[in-house]
Amino acid sequence: MVRSTDNSSTTALKAAIAAERRELADMLDALPPDAWDAPSLCAGWRVREVAAHMSMGFRHSFARQARELLKARGSIDRVADRLARQDAAAASPRELAAFLRDNAHHPWKPPVGGLALALGHDVVHGLDIAVALDLDRRVPEDRLRAVLDTVTPRSTRFFGADLTGVSLHADDLDWSFGSGTPLYGAAQDLVLVAFGRKLPPGRLRGEHGGRFTV
């Protein structure tokens, strides 16, 4: 019985990842040319670097990434930055969108975590673009809840989110995290906070909202 439940969950997550990638590819295809050079919520990256990074795991072999990691003296962040910039310069917007669409069912998973964090990777980076460009992108609730379930004290530390003295409270879903002074917002905006992002003004409510606002 446990095995059946696990299989159902795995199938659902794989389907959610594929759907998210296809929808993000459609979103990228619809962007006007100047949007590709607009800043994203990822510090130092334009939209095109984020789009390139989202498909990095599909296009670069483990051996290539290992070599890059050695050159970067073990820094995953430096590897991600170098490859994102190289790929963003080499590929056209149409190609960057196609990398996601053509690899909708690719089994890539992040170095730490399983399928739920693979979905989180796609959801968060998609929102890095959509929120920065003020696009009306709403992540479907089932995908959003799967990503919210990955938020833990360990994950927030890993992604550099300082939630000291703050508790997150979604005002559109029954979800909260942490203890301290409440910070309110849409669940998908709070996902971004939990993944270390700062948001444009007006999206968060609470005494500490300024800490997480650009």
Image (cartoon, rainbow, N blue to C red):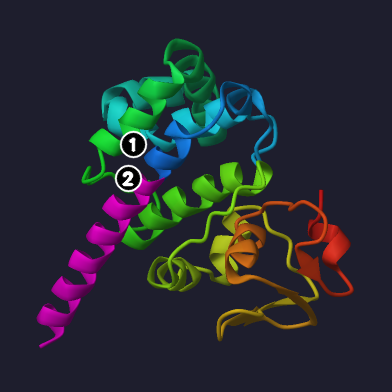
The magenta segment: 1-23
Q: Are marks 2 and 1 in contact (CB under 8 Å)?
A: yes
- Above or below, 1 against 193 in this view is below
In which quarter of the view is residue 19 placed? bottom left
- Above or below, 4 against 96 in this view is below
Q: Main secondary structure of the magenta part?
A: helix
Relative to 85, 34 lies left or right: right
Disc 1 is placed on an element classified as helix
Q: Nearer the viewer, residue 17 or 92?
A: 92
Q: Residues within 10 Å of mark 1 (few under 14, many from 20)?
A: many
Mark 2 or 1, closer to the camera? 2
Disc 2 is placed on an element classified as helix
Q: Residues within 10 Å of mark 2 (few under 14, many from 20)?
A: many
Relative to 206, 121 lies left or right: left
Q: In this figure, which residue is indicated by the disc labeled 2?
A: 22
Q: Which mark is residue 21?
A: none
The verdict on residue 187 being magenta is no
Q: Position of residue 36 (x, y in %)?
A: 58, 26
Report the amino acid beneath label 2: Arg
Q: Position of residue 190 (x, y in %)?
A: 64, 66
Q: Position of residue 124 (x, y in %)?
A: 52, 52
In which quarter of the view is residue 69 placed? top left
Q: In this figure, which residue is indicated by the disc labeled 1?
A: 100
The verdict on residue 7 being magenta is yes
At 43% from the left edge and 49% from the top edge, which residue is drawn? 122
In which quarter of the view is residue 202 placed? bottom right
N-term-proximal mark, 2 vs 1: 2
Single out the residue that lies furthest toward the top.
Answer: 90
Report the amino acid beneath label 1: Leu
Q: Position of residue 134 (x, y in %)?
A: 67, 47
Cα separation between marks 2 and 1: 7 Å
At 36% from the left edge and 26% from the top edge, which residue is drawn? 65
